[in-house]
Image (cartoon, rainbow, N blue to C red):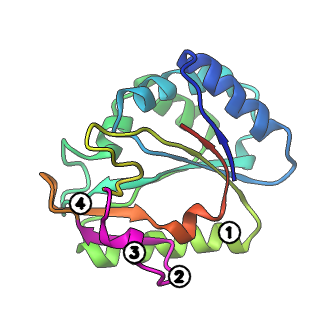
Amino acid sequence: MNIITTNAPAQRAVQELYSEVNSTSRQCLIILSGGSVSDFIICEHIPTEFKHINPGKIQFALVDERFSRDPHHKNGNAHTIEHVNSFNKFLAEKQIHLHVMLHGSDCNSEAMRYDAFLKARIRDGWIVFAVFGIGEDMHTAGLLPDSEPLKSNSGDYAVCYNSNDEYKYRITITPTMFSHISHAFV
């Protein structure tokens, strides 16, 4: 995995992401953490920097989600991204898919659905790019330090777990999925 760290403005980070995506002929999955201000800002720049992208080449998804049976709950990462109007207009105009995790089911079922989505993309040869932030409690990708998914070697790409924080349950990618990420922007 190539890890690209930057304290550059979000626009430059998105330009670098576009350059990497545009340099490959393969389909690309871009997973966004969505919970941090930096990802909100990054979503603001994607429509401008990706305006010439072949829409069949990319899909977006989330790195993690704070679980609720309400798919549009106000503390969700999808909710944050859904409120970046320019990003959603870009997705609609280009007919690019944003894969969200929550569909109104229980946490384990939602994680299994997302796990199957990720495995299908990897099996079909997609390149995975990730945009991560680091939370105040030092979590990234919904993984808190010393959390259960970090200790697991189940082979799952996504799991539901009790995070014992204010959101209680999270769906997140796992270390197994991390091994399939080509480029990580932090």
**10 Å neighbourhood of mark 3: few (<14), some, or many (≥20)?**
few
Q: Which residues lie in the magenta part?
A: 145-162
Give residue 67's mark: 4
Q: Position of residue 135 (x, y in %)?
A: 32, 39
User: For the residues carrying marks 4 and 3, which lies nearer the camera in this image?
Assistant: 3
Q: Which residue is mark 1?
A: 122
Determine whether, in the image, residue 176 is placed left or right of residue 25: left
Q: Amino acid at mark 3?
A: Lys
Q: Which residue is mark 2?
A: 155
Which residue is rendered at x = 47% and y = 84% of the image? 154
**Spatial separation of the CA atoms under disc 1 and disc 4:** 24 Å
**Spatial separation of the CA atoms under disc 2 and disc 1:** 13 Å
Lower position in the chain sequence, tag 3 or tag 1: 1
Give residue 75's mark: none
Residue closer to the observer: 29 or 82: 29
Residue closer to the observer: 86 or 35: 35
Find out whether residue 156 is within the magenta segment: yes
